Amino acid sequence: MEQTSRTITPEHSRSGWINGLIGVLIFSGSLPATRLAVLEFEPVFLTVARASIAAVLGLCLLWLLRERRPARNQWGPLLIVALGVVIGFPLLTALALQYVTSAHSIVFIGLLPLATAVFGVLRGGERPRPVFWLFSILGSLLVVGYALAQGLSAAPAGDLLMLLAVLVCGLGYAEGAKLARTLGGWQVICWALVVSLPVVAPLTLLLAPASFTGISLAAWLSLGYVALFSMLIGFVFWYRGLAQGGIAAVGQLQLLQPFFGLALAASLLHEPVSLGMLAVTVAVIACVALAKKFAR
């Protein structure tokens, strides 16, 4: 088991927060970019295409820098990371964004710190105080209540897909952060992408549109963003930050992601951001912040 009780020095803590913040800023553009991309690309194709592009780049990095192969006991966790953040989260969010706007989906991202913390507890053996779970459950109820208030019957599939996406992403974050302590931050995402390559590459060719004529520049740029930044560069900073500063602490930086994402959705996609949506996002963030306070 990784060193879950290791001492984190102030220097590592600062570096962890800086790297984590850069990762969150990069991830904040993922949902708006995915929303643009699925307007012209089929969701499953978008998922495997972005993973294939990032995997080829990751493989090149590993080869050029002559990185050692993971140990035998590290391939299992790498598979979990691949299923969680390389395939699961991108696919589920791409499918969800066919039913809901990116602004609506960003509210669910407010649950990611909670999901990451829960899987950090399950995988790391931490035992939070009972008050932690009180605020965690309250935050979850706020999100469910928001979905019901918006009329769940209008897009139940989108809300369910977003909840599943948050769960698999939290697992992938926690598993990858543990692995990064021994394998290295950027190496984790590169190897996880390589693990997925034998599956996503053939699917990319199989599911490719018969013709790319008529695909707009905005859609191509969105695909490039989610492949290069969301799928690779963001994780280089994110996993390094989690490994340096700790999963529970640095993971709370995800609380900023809804704000950044809502700003992007409003400015780039001209999507409406209601006061109710902002209020729920702030309330969820407050609950997760209080839960974090009692995490240890």
Image (cartoon, rainbow, N blue to C red):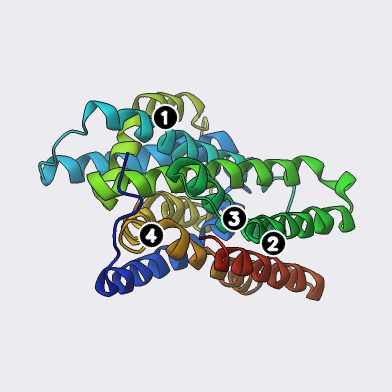
Q: Residues within 10 Å of mark 3 (few under 14, many from 20)?
A: many
Dot 4: element? loop
Q: Mark 3 points at which residue?
A: 114
* Amino acid at pointer 3: Leu
Residue appearing at x 41%, y 25% in the figure: 199
* Amino acid at pointer 1: Val
* Amino acid at pointer 2: Phe
Q: CA gap, disc 2 to disc 4?
A: 21 Å
Q: Which circle's residue, 2 or 3, is located before the other in the chain?
A: 3
Q: Residues within 10 Å of mark 1 (few under 14, many from 20)?
A: many
3 and 4 marks in contact (CB < 8 Å)? no
Dot 1: element? helix
2 and 3 marks in contact (CB < 8 Å)? no
Q: Which circle's residue, 1 or 3, is located before the other in the chain?
A: 3
Q: Name the residue under label 1.
A: 200
Task: Please state if 1 lies on the left or on the right of 112 as rendered.
Answer: left
Q: Nearer the viewer, mark 1 or mark 4?
A: 4
Q: Where is residue 55 in the image (x, y as percent from the top left)?
A: 32, 39
Q: Is residue 21 visible to us here? A: yes
User: For residue 246, which numbered disc appears in the image?
Assistant: 4
Q: CA gap, disc 1 to disc 3?
A: 29 Å
User: For residue 135, which numbered disc appears in the image?
Assistant: 2
Dot 3: element? helix
Q: Which circle's residue, 3 or 4, is located before the other in the chain?
A: 3
Q: CA gap, disc 1 to disc 4?
A: 31 Å
Q: CA gap, disc 2 to disc 3?
A: 10 Å
Considering depth in this image, is 91 or 98 the residue closer to the camera?
A: 91
Q: Which circle's residue, 1 or 4, is located before the other in the chain?
A: 1
